[in-house]
Image: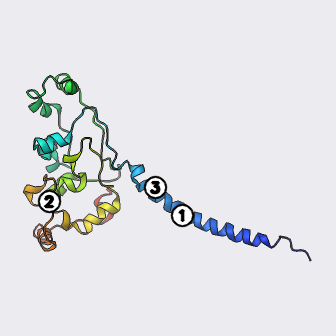
Amino acid sequence: MTPLFPVWTNALVRTGLLLGGLGAVGVPVFLLGLVRAPYTTYQFDPIDQPVQFDHRHHVRDEGISCLYCHYTAQSSPYAGIPPTSLCMNCHSQVWDAAKVLSSVRHSYFSGDSIVWNRVHNLPGFVYFNHSIHVDRGVGCESCHGRVDKMGLVYAEVPLTMSWCLECHRDPSAHIRGEDEITLMGWKPGTREEQARRVKDRNISPPTNCTACHR
């Protein structure tokens, strides 16, 4: 009796099942990787801003502390954007007629805020408190990178949940002295020294879901 299907269809069915299985596993894995890839998150992509503010000049050349401009990082969940009046503390005398700062002067005299573009943009369902990290000794550089080497600031770290949890599970490598929070190029001490800092400050970061998802 002639078979209903040719023998070669067996190989076709096996190939189809194999490809289907690979697709069922591979497609979700690919999509999960894609949403975390720098291509999608724009990690390392310099963000254009309405004013050509060069962190290299302000931080490295002039020695201005991060907390001079982002002063609410010590007491608030948000690091904040400095008001134009703070910029004019210097620029009412330095480069006070420079064309590149015309929008800063306009903002100061008109009261219209400068709309800056976000560099680190966490999802709305993620809660992050700057002050608790600064208070525990986590330096600006740990999350924001070497801004003293950036013309236009970009996101140097992925800020994914796994990246945050890695630090929460073992924060010792990031804990600094109180006078080293804004120091760029900081190097941690020995493993024992860093562990002692964690113990002395009673640092025990939460790893439960509600710590960040409230």
Residue at the disc numbered 2: 137
Element marked by disc 2: loop
Q: Split into 4 quadrants, where in the image is the C terminus?
A: bottom left
Instruction: Single out the mark in the foreground, 3 or 2.
Output: 3
User: Residue 85's x, y, as percent?
Assistant: 13, 31
Amino acid type shown at disc 2? Gly
Q: Earlier in the sequence, mark 3 or mark 1?
A: 1
User: Is residue 78 something one can see in this rendering?
Assistant: no
Residue kind at label 3, given as amino acid type: Leu
Query: Marks 2/1: CA distance?
Result: 41 Å
Label 3 CA crowd tier, 10 Å (few <14, some 14–19, many 20+): few
Circle on res. 134: none
Q: Badge 3 is on which residue?
A: 34
Q: Is residue 182 visible from the viewing direction of this image?
A: yes
Which label lies toward us, 2 or 1?
1
Q: Position of residue 207 (x, y in %)?
A: 29, 66
The front one of 95 and 201 is 95
Q: Residue at x 19, y 66 (%)?
A: 173
Q: Secondary structure at mark 1?
A: helix
Instruction: Identify the residue under disc 1.
Output: 26
Residue 44 in percent (x, y) is at: 33, 49
